[in-house]
Amino acid sequence: MKNVYFVQVDVSATYNHQTAYLPYTAGVLAAAAWESETVKENFVFKDFVFLREDVAQVAGRMENPSVVAFSCYSWNTEYNKALAREIKKLYPNCINIFGGHNVPDDFTMLEENSCIDFLCHGEGEDTVKKLFEAIALGTDFGEVPNISYRTGITEYRRTQTVCQKTLDYPSPYLEGWFDRLVDEHPDIIFNTILETSRGCPNQCAYCDWGMLKSRVRLFPLERIVAEVQWMADHKIAFVWGADANFGMFDRDLEIADALVEVKKKTGYPERMRMNYAKNKFENVFAIVKKFKECDFDRIGATLSFQSMSPTVLKNIGRTNKDLDFYKNLLAKYNKENMKAYSELILGLPGETYESFIKGVCTLFEIGLHFVYDVYGCVLLPNSQMGQKDYVEKHGLKTVRFELARPHYQSDAFAIPEYNQIVVQTNTMSREMWIRSYTFAFLTKSLHASGLVRAFAVYLRIIMQIPYEDFYDGIMDYFEENPDLFASKLYFQTKNNVSDQSLGVPGKKYIFEPCGDVVWEDNEIFYLNAIAGLEEFYEDISPYLKSFNIENDVFDDLMVYQKNILRKPGEEQCEIDLNYDIHGFLTDAYVNDYHSLLPKKHRLVLKDTRTVYGWPDFGKFVVWYGRLGRASYKDDVRPAE
């Protein structure tokens, strides 16, 4: 009998913290393989490796492994290689199998890593089962589909590509593959994956889901409901939905009901995050509303844009609806106090600095003021964009970019992980990429987190100053006044982005009052600004005054802006105003624009979720709260 280990180490799965994802992909593959009588008769499953421990310790406690199967994505590929090398040192005859999204459809990984014996391409249930059977029986590996392997010292073979057509595979949850793992780690809070469908009808150039060329397939509804109950029974804290388009099918409403029902009965899972359908807005709205009622979805509805440029959208094979549609949709979400957010990708072909910053600020125009993300364009090896002809056509230049590890201890990841990030295209120079990314981080600090949002919205509505002009001007102001406290925060971000554009590892930002925890660029800007609030506003006031806002209006905006922000230990405050600043802004956030009305009154601003001390402020406001709405006091009303 041959001993087998499956490895799927996640970004959060480290002993430095008490949370970890269950190794879902590894579990799916193991459950499928052990359906085979040949596999059962020849192999013994020993364990899942899911914690990011020292590779020498992990390999050292393995019991004479014959096969080790690794699931690879951007957050664990380098760790997997290091562990595979260590295993080969101790057990030269052990067979190391690599599969997953980060395995390119060529021989590169075999050529560069002698510790890897087989590559599995595409979906793995059928492939892994047949490969295990071939290893057990000593039959020709050429009969196993979707694999690459060595046939000589420098010779390789890629077998036939066969797409999986069904999803009739056993569930690792319901078959008990994770029961022992959970029982043996009572100190770990587990997160996991829920997969209700597989496949994507879209063919976005930057993504590798559509490249699998398989139709969208559905797991049985009764299986999904049973898996949800398993998650509740085992007190799973957080569930990430693996579907590309949750809400695409009407039955997804039933799945949402099952999740809500079990959450109400048991309290678990505590939170859910879905990738929502791109064009099923009614279904998505209904699902998000169901989740809101039991405080289930931490982020809310995803409005998928990636770019606002028609040229870019054509280049990447996407379309967006008319902006008025999204504006009305967001107003609907905001009026129901439901969360929504969006994502943009920097570095897509056809994007310019001007189109990118206008795209960011278009989010504000349609009412998305609070939570949004900007990601670097990752050149995935199995995407259309990752192919040589596409790269050459659009002049894509990349650097090996170390993955950021926000919200972990600074020394938590001894083995860095990397992505290939696009930092230059035919239409965007490296210098403009640096300015674009700096703009993105800055607007997340100043607008989404609300440091100067009141001024930006006022200037846009009353004085017709475009958001992009306002925030681009702030960058110029910081450049022209480099010695200011606020400018130093800006240059800290800009210099870090500049280093990363050259492949230099990013700086690990520590905000000492919060302890040895790493923060993202916009978060460290925000934390330092809150800590030095008076100096920050003193520094930026000359820029804000340059727009010639009437003095009494300016004073009201400044008083409101400073005091609406949540601060550690501040439960409430009262301010005297001459204008209805709060009503004006509250209406603007739901796209109801009107003039600023005179109204002499006293306003009470209360934080009903007050946090005391910087560590909790960092955790619950900056990290868990994702800033956005969480950065403002939540109970604001006139004094009685």
Image (cartoon, helix red, strand yellow):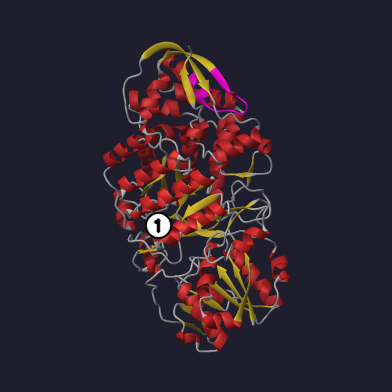
Q: State the image quarter where residue 8 is shown.
A: bottom right
**Residue 574 pos. (x, y %):** 53, 16
Q: Residue at x 42, y 47 (%)?
A: 343
Residue 311 image point, x, y percent:
30, 52
Percent x, y of residue 316: 34, 57
Does residue 15 appear to the left or right of 205 in the view shown? Answer: right
**Disc count in the image?**
1
Image quadrant where one finds the N terminus: bottom right
Magenta residues, as a range? 558-573
Mark 1: secondary structure: loop
In the rendered structure, does residue 571 fall within the stretch colored magenta?
A: yes
Q: Nearer the viewer, residue 35 or 386?
A: 35
Q: Is residue 98 magenta?
A: no
Tell me the crowding category of disc 1: few under 14, some 14 to 19, or many 20 or more residues within 10 angstroms, Cα based: many
Identify residue type, mark 1: Ala
The reply to whether residue 150 is visible in this rendering is no
* Placement of 306 over or under 357, stated as above or below: below
Residue extending furthest top? 600
360 shown above or below 396:
above
In the image, is 49 to the left or to the right of 347? right
The image position of residue 214, as x and y in percent, is 35, 68
- Please name whichever residue, 393 or 141, is drawn nearer the observer in this view of the structure: 141
Front in this rendered view, residue 296 or 616: 296
Q: Residue under circle 1?
A: 244
